Amino acid sequence: MNRLRGAWRQYWVALRAMIVLTVALGIGYTLVVTGVGQLALPAQANGSLISVDGKPVGSALIGQSFTDKDGAALPQWFQSRPSAAGDGYDGAASSGSNLAASNPDQQKAVKERTEAIEEADGVSAGSIPSDAVTASGSGLDPHISPAYALLQVDRVAAARGLPADSVRKLVESRIQGRDLGYLGDPTVNVLQLNLALSEMDK
């Protein structure tokens, strides 16, 4: 009888501990972290959404494609970095291709992307930066290198009937420096650049 009573006492202690910890860590901690996020960094906490005329058009943190329904690049828009996440920029399937540079499928994909850019932008393969033809590790990268953005200037300007110098200055004004001044490389957010580009037509 004493053994049974002792066992039940241990179970009751364990149950109470589980309930207390569930409330404290599962509910309380979540509410505190959410509250701090909403107060300190509300835009980031809500997905860094970008809106036009009150309608969300994307996120500053997740890339998107600027192609037609068949997947062909639209010449009037700056193109994003390739994505291997699902069907492209799928937040629920974030991943890279996980293919080595020596993999035949990877080499084929890079070759096809290179040829497409050579034709669309009228440039040589040697002038195409690597981020233009390879997917990022997450497949969601919203940024491209300044070199890739500047490479697209002439094509975008011609498609929109705009002076190339004006489009080039727009790109240069959208270059984001290194994080904290020394981490990573300068980048250009493609969605923000394209939104600024659309304002030039007005």
Image (tube, rainbow, N blue to C red):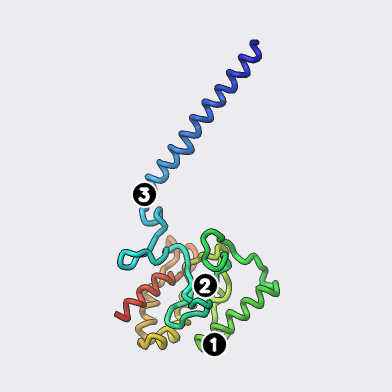
Task: Specify whether 102 is left or right of 150.
Answer: right
The residue nearer to you, when weighing 44 against 11, is 11
The residue nearer to you, when weighing 171 against 97, is 97
Q: Position of residue 71 (x, y in %)?
A: 53, 77
Comes first in the chain, label 3 or label 1: 3
Q: What residue do we see at 59% from left, 23% from top?
A: 11
Q: Secondary structure at mark 2?
A: loop
Q: Determine the image quadrant of residue 4.
A: top right
Q: What residue do we see at 56% from left, 68% from top?
A: 87
Residue annotated with mark 3: 38
The alpha-carbon separation of the residues under discs 3 and 2 comes to 30 Å
Q: Secondary structure at mark 1?
A: helix
Residue annotated with mark 1: 119
Residue type, label 3: Gln
User: Are there few (<14), some (14-19), or many (20+) residues within 10 Å of tag 3?
Assistant: some
Comes first in the chain, label 3 or label 2: 3
Q: Secondary structure at mark 3?
A: helix
Comes first in the chain, label 2 or label 1: 2
Residue type, label 1: Glu
Total labels: the figure holds 3
Q: Determine the image quadrant of residue 164.
A: bottom left
Asked if labels 1 and 2 touch by Cβ distance under 8 angstroms, the answer is no
Residue 145 seen in this snapshot: no
Residue type, label 2: Arg
Asked if labels 1 and 3 touch by Cβ distance under 8 angstroms, the answer is no
Residue 191 seen in this snapshot: yes
Q: What residue do we see at 50% from left, 65% from top?
A: 184
Q: Position of residue 167 (x, y in %)?
A: 37, 82
The alpha-carbon separation of the residues under discs 2 and 1 comes to 17 Å
Q: Position of residue 31 (x, y in %)?
A: 41, 41
